[in-house]
Amino acid sequence: MKRSLSILTLFSFLVPYAVVAAPPRTPDKTVNCDILVVGGGLSGVATAYEAILAGQTVCLTEITDWLGGQISSQGTAALDERPTQRRKLFYSRGYLELRKRIENKYRGNINPGNCWVSDSCFLPRDGHEILTSMLKDAEKKGKGKLQWFPNTVIKELEYSSDGKLISSAIAIQHQPVQGAPPLNTFPLSQTIEDAYTYQNSSRFAKTIVRLVPKQTKSKAGSNAPNWYVVDTSETGEIIALADVPYRLGIDARSYLEPSSSSTQNDSYCTQGFTYTFAMEATDNPQTQTMPAFYPQYAPYYSYELKRLASFPLVFTYRRIWSPTKGQPMEFGGVKFTGPTPGDISMQNWTWGNDYRPGTSADNLIYNRQQLQSAGQLQPGGWMGGLRKEALRKAEEISLGYYYWLTAGNTDSQLGNGVKQPQPNNRFLSGLDSPMGTAHGLSKHPYMREGRRIIGRPSWGQPEGFSIWEIDISRRNYDDEYYRKTLPPDTYRRLKAALGGLEAASVLSGQVSPDKVARRTRSTIFPDAVGIGHYAIDFHPCMTKSPPETPGNTDRAGERRGAGQAYPFQIALRAMIPQKIDNLLVGGKSIGTSHIAAAAYRVHSFEWSAGAAAGTTAAFALKNGVAPYQLVEKLPLPEPRLQLLKQLLERNGNPTAFPDTSIFNQNWDDWK
């Protein structure tokens, strides 16, 4: 694994290129699709997988050249799973196939990294290769077709005359110009503006692609959409570009979101994002070169807690390759095998390479007002919707974290005398390194939160459907905090919402909120099309700007919503945006609240949401029905919705956990 260019050289080398979007030239080619999937992460791959098995022609775009998002281009090749669900192997069929192929790749070992955070830690490049083979096999089995567009972004959308349908999309695909450095030489902050610019540059030659429906009308001969666009991007790019209603960041405290840290919405405070990297244990000490920017970020780094203040513990936490078994160790109640030379660890640490901005001066994902001010919602103005400077600083804090791990002796949370240098390690960079980049950082940052749609008005949620904190949390809302913090009417509504059949009596005052039995399951959705299970896990934004300010702290109250969750469902209403009838949403941008999103973001959920999106789009095309028509009359029965749910179940894509019923209140076995 070679260092093709020095890390510091890469971060100081800027090639001039155009940064302002120009009017589009005539597209170089037109490509026909039944379903356009934007974003090649796990949810995008799952969407394509199910749609191809259903015989559809799928166009799949991705800003990087790897499929898999979390497990590949974002470097987090450590499957986040809950013990009960993993023990029962109760997952979507494609996710089970992914796990099986990981195990086969490593000759019967699903955990070649011998990590302790997961039952499966592996090399990111292998994640991409496995998913590529899965899609190829799906083409053979389902007779569908994949048209894969790596290094490609969506620049513009075109609409029907009434504005209710996306009629086509304009994409930009880039490749290095002759004589320029290869792809993945430079980090995203240095290439993102170029990727969204029509003109060729000194780095990239651009191919302009117009993506259009394959069918002139619905196969069923109705007025239903004749193709679908599915937004599975990491930040909700298409929902921003299409300007459908969405939320970003903190939701105001309410009876639905009682643990919110704010009485008002705050779109600037999203979860932290992370450039992961890989490091290798060595026999001998290595020379560790301090980056010029290290002093700026040194006040941030920490092991965070005394029970985590062990380098072997942190190294093996997400170890992705371990050819030799180390000696048994224990620290902070965790048992693991220690590092040995040749072991490779992927780093993803809250007080390390997480970057956690939380103000209008430094937030990564632009809100609607910021997009408008920057001209990104004007024709031809879309540039990805991200702050380039936040990306750059996240890249720096990650490189600085490696230096802190190997040479640092300070700790911002635990004080002096805790952190000791660990020089017997080297940073892995080069195009043949685990991250597949010359600079050694992941191709794209690991995203924990993006823009989240507000679904269409629905029974019980007239302002638009969302999945909220109280729909999934195991929290005991009898806690004194909620009694004192929430206004009496809000607290009464909270207890009524959790009271089931007693709700009306609580609201009317006939039953005291204190007498309501605590609900011991998640909300059961009649339009459930997928499942997930994970803790509500926060990497909060920081109080002050910039995040690395000495003495900075997590935003007050942000971790209050964290904790255990019941197994939960993915409602179809959470995947259908307002305004546009042929747009579906998968991945992290479905309609969830800020707190619920902290659980609806991990690997198996992303796959289940994608499987639901791909199946729903294919079902809608075949049956000449728009997805919103399947849910618009709820809670009244809808036969076509039941057919979709039956199809999902028949195909091995669960829509509910075992024994899910309004009469079954005992979900405590699902830990």
Image (cartoon, rainbow, N blue to C red):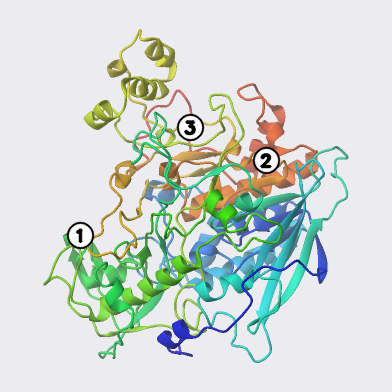
Q: Label 3 belongs to which residue?
A: 660
Q: Residues within 10 Å of mark 3 (few under 14, many from 20)?
A: some
Left or right, 335 with respect to 456, comes to left
Does 589 sit above or below residue 351?
above
Label 3 to label 1: alpha-carbon separation: 38 Å
Does 107 sit above or below residue 432?
above
Instruction: Give the mark nearest the N terminus, 1 or 2.
Output: 1
Q: Name the amino acid, label 2.
A: Leu
Q: Secondary structure at mark 2?
A: helix
Q: Label 1 belongs to which residue?
A: 305
The percent coordinates of residue 651 (x first, y second) are 64, 46
Q: Is residue 65 visible?
A: no
The quadrant in which the N terminus is found is bottom left
In the image, what residue occupies the spot 68% across and 26% down? 638
Q: Name the amino acid, label 1.
A: Leu
Is there CB contact under 8 Å for labels 3 and 1?
Answer: no
In the image, what residue occupies the spot 28% across and 80% down? 340
Q: Secondary structure at mark 3?
A: loop
Q: Label 2 belongs to which residue?
A: 647
The percent coordinates of residue 597 (x first, y second) are 45, 46
The quadrant in which the C terminus is found is top left
Q: Residues within 10 Å of mark 1 (few under 14, many from 20)?
A: few
The percent coordinates of residue 604 (x first, y second) are 50, 53
**Quadrant location of residue 648?**
top right
